[in-house]
Amino acid sequence: PRLFLERTGLDPDEFRVESVRVHKGRPVVKLDGVSSITEAQALAGRAIGVPSSEIESPPDGSFYHFELVGLEVHDERLGFIGTASEILSTGGTDVIVVTTPDESEVLLPLCSEICRRVDPAKGRIDIAAPDGLLEANAR
């Protein structure tokens, strides 16, 4: 597999992954051409990208965060709410940050009770927000 490390203002660097192991609960990735800790430390802090063709499909009913960002969010009663701009990992239920047309934000739990249908192919998340949820979670 390949991965890319972003560089500010430049094309990303491409690396081949030689191996992956877990150490103290965290992945340790050996990259082709990086042979010392000093070389590896020079890469720290750079964003990692992986070609979508090399990503395994998630289990049915699950989605990668990048698949959700940019989807329109529609409520069954209120219609268009806004666009999913970010997914927050909370350690429990993930949260969708929805940017509304007036540029405010609403936080929605990413759970089946609220997010009734997620359809990246159609560019849409259909929700059934309980009364008061949208107002209570505005920021």
Image: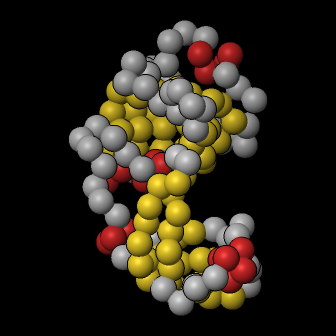
Residue 57 or 24: which is nearer the viewer? 24
User: Farthest residue in the left direction?
Assistant: 60
The answer to whether residue 127 shows anywhere in this view is no
Q: Residue at x 70, y 70 (%)?
A: 44
Q: Quadrant of the N terminus?
A: bottom left
Q: Position of residue 31 (x, y in %)?
A: 50, 79
Q: Residue at x 73, y 84 (%)?
A: 9
Q: Position of residue 88 (x, y in %)?
A: 60, 39
Question: Would you say 125 lies left or right of 59 here?
Answer: right
Q: Is residue 77 above or below residue 62?
A: above
Q: Is residue 78 above or below residue 71?
A: above
Q: Position of residue 84 (x, y in %)?
A: 55, 44
Residue 24 or 46: which is nearer the viewer? 24
The answer to whether residue 38 shows anywhere in this view is yes
Question: Would you say 91 lies left or right of 57 here?
Answer: right
Residue 87 or 81: which is nearer the viewer? 87
Q: Position of residue 82 (x, y in %)?
A: 57, 40
Q: Residue at x 58, y 85 (%)?
A: 35
Q: Residue at x 75, y 29 (%)?
A: 139
Question: Would you say 109 lies left or right of 56 here?
Answer: right
